[in-house]
Amino acid sequence: MMINALYRWFVESRDRQKTLKQRLQHARNSQPGNEALHDPIEDDAKYMVAIALADALAADDLADAPRNRGFCYLYWKTKQRILKETFEITWFSPCDMNPSIRFD
């Protein structure tokens, strides 16, 4: 049971890294001159409704959370989870897309 969970985690992690690499390349090509890149799926009409709903659900989930430094990371993780669990969409946060930028 533990080996299956570890293997599943490894495969998901490997696939996520591969997808991130592809999205970063696409973002660099489609967003020239942008200081900070965003996940290219945000520009795809077929994902816009799901992303907007995830934004609203994340804001609702975190309505009582203090808006301290670092809140954006909590918000992005919540949005990422909602997109994955509810819509089966892999979304990369600004932090994922811009590892050399410190947010907040």
Image (tube, rainbow, N blue to C red):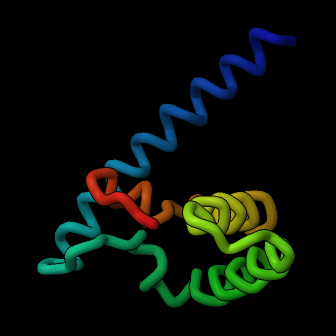
Total numbered circles? 0
Residue 78 picture location, percent across and down: 71, 63
Image-based side of 97 in relation to 32, left or right: right
**Residue projecting furthest to the left:** 33
Q: Residue at 46% of width from left, 74% of height from top?
A: 41
Direction from residue 81 to residue 14 in the image, left or right = left
* Residue 62 or residue 9, whichever sits in front: 62
Q: Is residue 66 left or right of residue 40?
A: right
The residue at the point 75 percent across, 71 percent down is: 66
Residue at horizontal 36%, vertical 58%?
A: 102
Task: Report the side of 47 relative to 25 (left or right).
Answer: right
- 41 vs 25: above or below: below
- Identify the image quadrant of the C terminus: bottom left
At horizontal 49% and vertical 32% (from top left) the residue drawn is 14
Observer-nearest residue: 84 or 57? 57
Q: Position of residue 96 (x, y in %)?
A: 43, 55
Residue 89 shows in this picture: no
Q: Is residue 44 above or below residue 25?
A: below
Which of the 4 image quarters holds residue 7?
top right
Q: Quadrant of residue 3?
A: top right
| Residue 92 seen by the camera | yes
For residue 5, above or below residue 62: above
Quadrant in the picture for the N terminus = top right
Rendering coords of residue 70 (x, y %): 57, 61
Q: Nearer the viewer, residue 78 or 74?
A: 74
